[in-house]
Amino acid sequence: ESSRFSDRVPLLTRVVDLFLRGRLPPLLIAASVAAGLVALLGTPREEEPQIVVPMADVHVSAPGLPVEEVERQLATRIEKLLSQIDGVEHVYSMSLPGRAVVTVRFHVGEDREDSLVKIYNKIYSNTDQIPPAVRSWVVKPVEIDDVPIVIATLWSERPEVIDDFALRRIAEELEIELQAVEETNRTEVVGGRPRVVRVELDPDALAARQTSALEVAWALGVSNARSAAGGFDRHDGFIVVDAGDFIGGVPALRRTVVNVVDGIPVSLGDVARVRDGPAEREGYGWIGFGAGEDLRSEHVERSVFLPAVHVGVAKKKGSNAVRVAERVEQRIEELADTLLPAGVHVRITRDYGETANDKVNELLEALAVAIVIVIALIAYSLGWREGLV
């Protein structure tokens, strides 16, 4: 009789009765709360959504070709080839004197590795159509994680003593140290002049010593080379022999023989000025301070722009931007006392982790407010006990 009665009870009534009288609801509530806390603490906090949109730039180098020839012979042909790949949404290019950049973008959701393989396969399977003027090409994937999440700006309160060249040297050392921070990806230095060794030929000295610029370039190329020349067995061991050597510094470069005229060797210092210092300026980087800045400790006047060099640090895919940014900033603070000389300061001008954390906290605050409103509405209409449940 009881079984026939239970058969007549609707299924929904029995489910509700199970949750009202059994011990399963508290366990489910505890498991849900635990899962929510794990998701809240374990999910990476990021500002941009991780949407899979495979994208790559194809850089083609063809020195000597004008823009018109680059567009007709290189960019147009590569655009046609890449547009034939399955899953490609857009292909566009930029032509410059002697080089071109062709960008290919796939549809949302396409597999990134498969898309890159398709690009390589399409390019290398059509190498017979490459014009002779092309010297090299390279495929560079583009991802949202390549954008720096932290930018540290170095500047000096004494630009006449520590200029952008010195700041660049300091920034390069800082970049090397930041590469060891956990879960960091690409790092780069922007601004300043890098260190180069410049050889400025003297036309009068070249003519007086019967030496041409091509002979100097050839001599430097063959003098700065080392290659394996075999080896020999000795005392139960094998000794490797290398032929040639690299030029060891600016003094050795000045003593390098570039020609022999009438039995007299001509060194590079006889026909050129060798300078070890900053490269030619290609751009400017500045930092300025407004009226709201407290610069009493730096002794800097407001509304004054000073040379600056920036160090950008990106994160790995799937990592927590907040934690990576905190590690980077902590490492910069640790290195400031030993790496930065007197008069050089560092300032975080971009903190992706802070902005991402603020937006996530705003979202959580909105969810908490929504929960409180729902509880209040249920309590108002049904009662406080039902609202708390």
Image: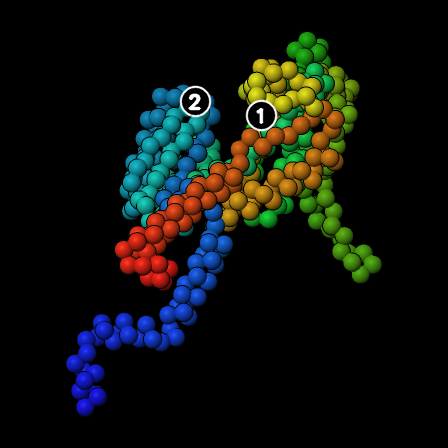
Q: Is residue 243 left or right of residue 66?
A: right
In the rendered image, the vertical position of residue 178 relative to residue 13, given as above or below: above
Q: CA distance from mark 2 to mark 1?
A: 24 Å
Which residue in the protein does label 1 denote?
191
**Residue lying at 58% horizontally and 43% vertically, measured from the top left:** 326
Could you tell me residue 87's position as x and y percent? 29, 46
Picture coordinates of residue 310, whole percent (x, y): 58, 29
Q: How many marks?
A: 2
For image coordinates 64% across by 33% down, the residue present is 172
Q: Residue furthest right?
A: 235
Residue shown at the point (45%, 56%) measured from the top left: 39
Secondary structure category for the residue under label 2: loop
The crowding category of the residue bearing disc 2, from other C-alpha atoms within 10 Å (few below 14, some 14 to 19, many at least 20), is some
Res 221 visible: no
Where residue 233 sits, quadrant-wise, is bottom right
Label pair 2/1, CB-CB below 8 angstroms:
no
Residue 5, compared with residue 49, is above or below; it is: below
| Quadrant hosting residue 266 | top right
Q: Which quadrant of the rendered structure holds the C terminus?
A: bottom left
Q: Residue at x 32, y 56 (%)?
A: 379
In the depicted view, which residue is nearer to us: 367 or 129?
367
Q: Could you tell me which quadrant the N terminus lies in?
A: bottom left
Observer-nearest of 66 and 214: 66
Mark 1 is surrounded, within 10 Å at the Cα level, by few (under 14), some (14 to 19) or many (20 or more) other residues, namely many
**Which tag is nearer the camera, tag 2 or tag 1?**
1
> Which label number is shown at residue 34?
none
Q: Position of residue 108 (x, y in %)?
A: 32, 45
Q: Which residue is mark 2?
A: 97
**Left or right of 5 in this view: 156:** right
